[in-house]
Image (cartoon, rainbow, N blue to C red):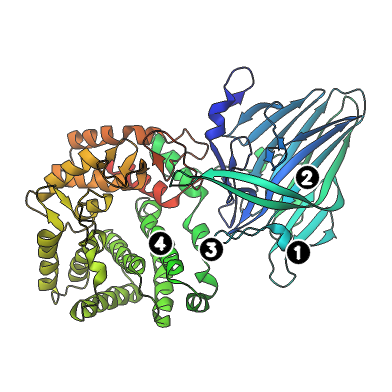
Amino acid sequence: MYKRGINNLEQFKNMNFYLSSNKSAYLSMGAILDIKKPYNGMYIKSSKIYVSHVVEKIEIGSKSYNIAELSTLTKQLSSEIYLNELDLENNYFEYICNDIKYSKKINFIPKTDILCIEYDIKSSAKQKVVFKVVPYLTYRDMTNMKKSNILKFNKRPIESGILINLSVTDDENIIIKSDYATFFEVDSYLNNIKHEFIDTNLTKELFIEDVYLPGEFEIKVKPGAELSFRVYISCKEFEITNYLNKSLSELVKKDKDNIKVEYVELKKLTSAIKAFELDDMISSIPAKINIKKMVYNLETNDIDKLSIELCNITKAIDGQYLVLNKFDKALEKLELIISYTLQMDKVGVIESIEYVKLKLWIIEIINKIADKNQGLSDLTKDFLRNTILDIRYNMLNNKSDYLKYIEVIALTYNAFKIYEDILDDNTYFEISKEIKETILIKFWNSEFKVLKYNLDDIKLYASPEMIYSLSLSYQSVDGDIPIKLLDTVFKELYTPYGLREVSKNSLNYKGIIYPRYMSHFVKANLRQNGVTYASQKISYNLVKELLLEIGKHSINTVKSIYHEKGINIDSNSIDLLTTAEMIRLYDMLT
């Protein structure tokens, strides 16, 4: 919460403000409703951002105020001097512009994709005030940014507002309405909007775009009057009569989790998970539309990108569903991802290490579902059987270059053991032994106490992928190696906020830290030391600072990437895999 004169606004500028409909639309902005990253916006549907900003304009006689956080190449609008109060827990913002005080509360109406901005205005002015709400639209493809002025927007007036789209044939509409404000059509662009962000290479990036203004919602406020009205944004046609004269406090009810009251951190984490579910991630994948057509047109790096995205979703199933005992949901999502891989296999052009990793991580999740005594479908068992057969065929025909990587070979050993266990088939028992011996002989270096990241590496450094040899369902190293390996991880990779991307002794280390590895680090420690109150307490102390990050952000989660020196790296406002891994981490410690 912020209150002018009490808090320092600077700390709020680093926060993210995030809302979701739990369907297919969401909001992702800075805490003061600024946009510093090209993938943020006021109203986002799937992978396209339609409403980038909503600006308030106030006209009192000859005076005019623009309440916005907007930067162009020639000017900058800032709402800081007008911001009086904000409460990110309740999505509440209050502004004072001399004789006008107004608040807005932002929420998605439950069970819909309708974003509602509720305005309450109090005027102490001695003359009439014109209050305008100005929506700016853009079109951005998440992987291929385009300036919106290249694309022609179509619009047509509708009752209480406006409907805008790029094409009348693709059913990608944005609809903006108001219950009391009057809509006046305008047709103009605001050019050269700047979004500045820092990438993982610590490079300052600048994305510039144009935004489209279809019109303005206007309401007149009499001298000394108080009034309320609402602006609604949606991707589908809707009637607003059901929402008239109802406050958002009546409409919005928070879900209560079936979690013990004392697990406050876990309750916060599950709230973050609910804010951005797997449904949202899966709905943003082009594969759902026509994966066969898409894969034919993909370059290798695009196949890798798609495989990584599907892999992250797969791994997130554990924290989002299995830990919370939502087994049916877990199996449903896993089978959907398996169906994607079957379509990709039919195309026959997939020769990607990332794609191999995806299949192997699917097998790890299959085992976790089986461990919960949940029955596996024939589809899932067939996937397990066929994947193992493919791997074995590639090994016999020297097509297994991907086994050069420690993550892949640890996952491969794990997959063969899972195959043996679930299908009760020892056909490949000797193969799994050979894989384990390969890890010991070719990957393990006793002098540096590391597992090579890649067999071709000349210089040896610790990498976070080593931890998978200890944290998967089946541990692929034994003897005294696990203890030595954990010692190396602790000395060279560990920080309180995550594992480093590479050893701090490496010349390639840039200070990047990933929290998502911490659940694997803790599991490896508990596996070696046994799960006791004492070992859990030691592990908790290792991750305490990371867990304390939960609740510091408006979405009650942790970032996907940190920097050891505290540099604020721009990343997605919420990373589902990292949040799911934090739930898994908290579950291990409680």
Residue nearest the observer in this picture, 340 or 188: 188
Farthest left residue in view: 479
Taking the spot 48% from the left edge, 45% from the top edge, the residue there is: 203
Q: Mark 4 belongs to which amino acid?
A: Ile
The percent coordinates of residue 415 (x first, y second) are 23, 67
Q: Mark 2 belongs to which amino acid?
A: Val
**Residue 244 visible in the snapshot:** no
Residue nearest the observer in this picture, 238 or 18: 18
Q: Earlier in the sequence, mark 2 or mark 1?
A: 2
Report, in whole angstroms, how far the alpha carbon at label 3 lies from the one at label 1.
Answer: 25 Å
The percent coordinates of residue 11 (x first, y second) are 53, 28
Res. 139 image quadrant: bottom right
Quadrant of image for the N terminus: top right
Report, in whole angstroms, how far the alpha carbon at label 1 lies from the one at label 4.
Answer: 33 Å
Residue nearest the observer in this picture, 577 or 76: 76
Label 3 CA crowd tier, 10 Å (few <14, some 14–19, many 20+):
some
Label 1 CA crowd tier, 10 Å (few <14, some 14–19, many 20+):
few
Say which of marks 3 and 1 sits in front: 1
Q: Earlier in the sequence, mark 1 or mark 4?
A: 1
Tag 1 residue: 152
Tag 3 residue: 283
Q: Earlier in the sequence, mark 3 or mark 4?
A: 3
Quadrant of image for the C terminus: top left
Tag 2 residue: 134
Q: Secondary structure at mark 2?
A: strand
Say which of marks 3 and 4 sits in front: 4
Tag 4 residue: 308
Q: Secondary structure at mark 1?
A: loop
Q: Secondary structure at mark 4?
A: helix
The percent coordinates of residue 216 (x first, y second) are 82, 47
